Image (cartoon, rainbow, N blue to C red):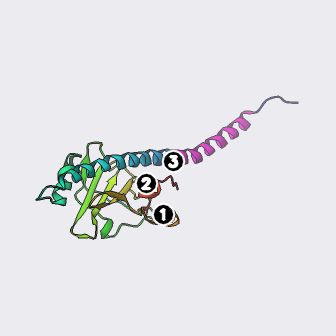
Amino acid sequence: MKKGFTIVEVSILFVIFLIVAFLVAPLSLDDSLQAKNTSRWRNVQTDFANIFYAINTQKNQEDFDFKKAFESIIAGEIKGEAAPYKITFMNGTFPNSTYRFNDFKLTQTNSIIAYKLFDTPQGDLRGLLMYDVNGSVGPNEWGKDVYGMNIYSDRFEPFCKNDPITVQKQECSKDGTGLCCSNYHLIGGSF
């Protein structure tokens, strides 16, 4: 009667453990990266609330110009220019012109920001803002590290804030665009 394991049996067990580790590790790394990016996005919400406080203090001036006020306050957040790069939707397609941004700026926290202010406001909507929480480092994908906000006269509002949760969840999936993750992650939704 033999006691213990042979070198072949130990080697087989070792290989099995390695295979399982290689299969599980990327999933946990992706989850922790997503949690970190979501946390950064939550912090951005607080920072941008302060921007509108500053804009609202200027509204009583006779020559108040929203675009000028917005850009002067945002300028304090900007460290410099950033090279443009491609950003995709979660489903792998490229955004249409509405969600494509030029003029990327590097923030004080090494994130990337870009915005479009409309020449003619669309109701109370003044423009759109894109925020890449980890800068130009990948994945550069809406809903994973890129989020967005609507710019209104008196507030920023994450994309899809007023959409039903079911729509947000669908859009924040591998088959969706990822735009709704901007709000879905703030209310506790996950992939």
165 in magenta: no
- Tell me the residue at 19%/56% (across/down): 59
Judge the density around disc 1: few (<14), some (14-19), many (≥20) Cα neighbours within 10 Å: many
Badges 2 and 1: C-beta atoms under 8 Å apart?
A: no
- Labels 3 and 2: the sequence-earlier one: 3
Picture quadrant where residue 22 is located = top right
Judge the density around disc 2: few (<14), some (14-19), many (≥20) Cα neighbours within 10 Å: many
Q: Amino acid at mark 1?
A: Gln
Give the Cα separation between the discs numbered 3 and 2. 10 Å
Camera sees residue 133? no
Q: Which element is circle 2 on?
A: loop
Judge the density around disc 3: few (<14), some (14-19), many (≥20) Cα neighbours within 10 Å: some
* Residue 30 badge: none
17 in magenta: yes
Q: Which residue is mark 1?
A: 168
Q: Amino acid at mark 3?
A: Asp
Q: Which residue is mark 2?
A: 144
Q: Amino acid at mark 2?
A: Lys
The N terminus: image quadrant: top right
- Labels 2 and 1: the sequence-earlier one: 2
Picture quadrant where residue 140 is located = bottom left
- Tell me the residue at 72%/37% (across/down): 8
Q: Which element is circle 3 on?
A: helix
Give the Cα separation between the discs numbered 3 and 1. 19 Å
Q: Is residue 133 left or right of residue 23?
A: left
What predominant SS class does the magenta segment belong to?
helix
